Amino acid sequence: MTIGIWVLGDQLNLAQSALASADPAAARVLLVESTSVLQRRAYHRQKLVLVWSAMRHFASELRTAGWRVDLAERESFGAAVRDWIASAGISELRVMEPADRGFREAIEALRLPLPLHWITSNAFLWSREEFAAWAQGYKQLRLELFYREGRRRFGVLMEGEGKNAQPLGGQWNFDAENRKPPPKGLRGPEALWFEPDAITQSVMLKLQRIDQERAESGLPPLPGELEPFRWAVNREQALAVLEHFIVTRLAGFGPFQDAMVSGEPTLWHALLSPYLNLGLLHPLEVIRRLEQAGLQQQVPLAGLEGVIRQILGWREYTHGLYHWFGADYPALNHFGADQPLPQSFEQLGGSGLNCLDSVLEELRSNGYAHHIQRLMVLANYGLIAGLDPQALTAWFHRMFIDGHDWVMQTNVIGMGLFADGGRLASKPYAASGNYINRMSTYCKGCSFDVKQRHGPKACPFNSLYWDFLARHAESLRRNPRMGLVIKQLDKLPAEELDQIRASASNHLQCCAAGR
Ligand SMILES: Cc1cc2nc3c(=O)[nH]c(=O)nc-3n(C[C@H](O)[C@H](O)[C@H](O)COP(=O)(O)OP(=O)(O)OC[C@H]3O[C@@H](n4cnc5c(N)ncnc54)[C@H](O)[C@@H]3O)c2cc1C
């Protein structure tokens, strides 16, 4: 009788529930590096290196902890699991409930010849059942309510006990202090990066072989640069990134959280999402450590509360909503958007817009862009240009180092594109070039003019923005938070609006023609 535990690539934590359910002496662990995923999605090279290298490192961590571990490099994960079950004499298989819905479906579709037990996940603070119990009490779900409940429930940044507990500093949210535009010459602290070790180098060689095989079969190359690869690949390094964040960035996290600066891809951002999402770090340990260090170092509460809100609030919320909204959510398309993605998205550069190209080029070099670059440049462009939401979600999933279905759906379909009609956000995050000009340094070096709304030199974010408002004026008018901008739209002289819309259409035609 040997219990088999199949650990998926985003479950790389010794305390995860399937491992915790068994005794190392009576169990065997499987990890599968399957290349068949590339038939469905051509992932950024660095994302593949990160996941596979982290799996190999985790396998050796498990062995040190006394587990018998098999790591299979195969094309199909189904064949790998079946062969392992037979050769290792596995009599019962345990898998921690995957965060992404598709994994469970794919594993169930294998119809494996033994009892399969799904072990309730402990990868998040809120279980799906707990989230559902909270959510069903509300007609309209909003982050702020969920976040406050999380603060109370887990006793984070609270003073006082039980029912009398109050938020530290007398306020739940200090976001208003955190939206500063970048002053001239703003530079963030250096990020902590790592040289690839022997394990990572062997995965990078594998990627080169895959690239060569793709070229020989006439398949397009994988996107993104392979080198320099500098991400953390094991728990020890991920913990070092957390500590480095605390020492170099925590105190400054708040004020420039929304700023975008050319040549400064990371600013004060934590760079923790890849490690949280693979399980190398657990969100509760990160929250507790941030709270403890932040209070001890007396860092400004606005920054400390700001980063804790991202993890205890947004991260848990997007995961909870993904399961709460259900399987139909990914197909939503509120605005009926159907434009194909421009070539510059696939090529990760070459749009001619300085903002888009800066972000796409940073993405190409390491698979990362910070939140406001994702929301207000990439997704905002997708929203106002009317890009197909499902194609854009799939693109985000492939290109981002931290992209997983559970976090992508709600962030792209919901927050970025409003394709869910407002189930997540209370209004579309649509913005013209004005916003980008105020919050970034991108417009200065751009060949388009951010002050113009139409004509060949006009910033496409301007023409697309007004065109978006005009296209959807009737439905947007019903949203009280859009009242002010719809009033501005109504005031635009008809002739000017026609010119703006012609510029927008021109831009989209150029994109479609690859110019
Ligand atoms: C269009 C779009 C796509 C996104 N895609 C992803 C994705 O594929 N994977 C991903 O993990 N996050 C995604 N996010 C959320 C967020 O942008 C990233 O978590 C964050 O930029 C990661 O960088 P960081 O670790 O430096 O984060 P910081 O800005 O320093 O924030 C700290 C942590 O808070 C969490 N967090 C912050 N905002 C969110 C959020 N909206 N949803 C979930 N967690 C959040 C992350 O774990 C992050 O590591 C997306 C957001 C948008 C608008």
Image (cartoon, rainbow, N blue to C red):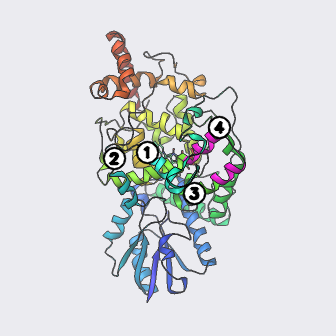
Q: Would you say the magenta stretch is mainly helix, strand or loop?
A: helix
Where does label 4 land, which residue? 264
Q: Which residue is mark 2?
A: 138
Tell me residue 114's x, y (percent).
Answer: 35, 82
Per the image, the residue denoted by label 3 is 275
Q: Nearer the viewer, residue 405 or 298?
A: 298
Between marks 1 and 4 in the image, the one whose residue lies nearer the viewer: 1
Mark found first going from the N terminus, 1 or 4: 1
Position of the N terminus by quadrant: bottom left
Is 293 a magenta residue?
A: yes
User: For the residue marked with disc 3, what is the amino acid?
Assistant: Tyr
The kind of residue tagged 2 is: Tyr
| Residue 418 forms part of the magenta stretch | no
Stretch of the chain drawn in magenta: 290-308
On the image, numbered disc 1 is attached to which residue?
145
Q: Residue furthest bottom?
A: 1
The mark closer to the camera, 3 or 4, is 3
Compare marks 2 and 4 and give the one earlier in the sequence: 2
Number of other residues with Cα within 10 Å of mark 3, as a class: few under 14, some 14 to 19, many 20 or more: many
* C-alpha gap between disc 2 and disc 4: 41 Å
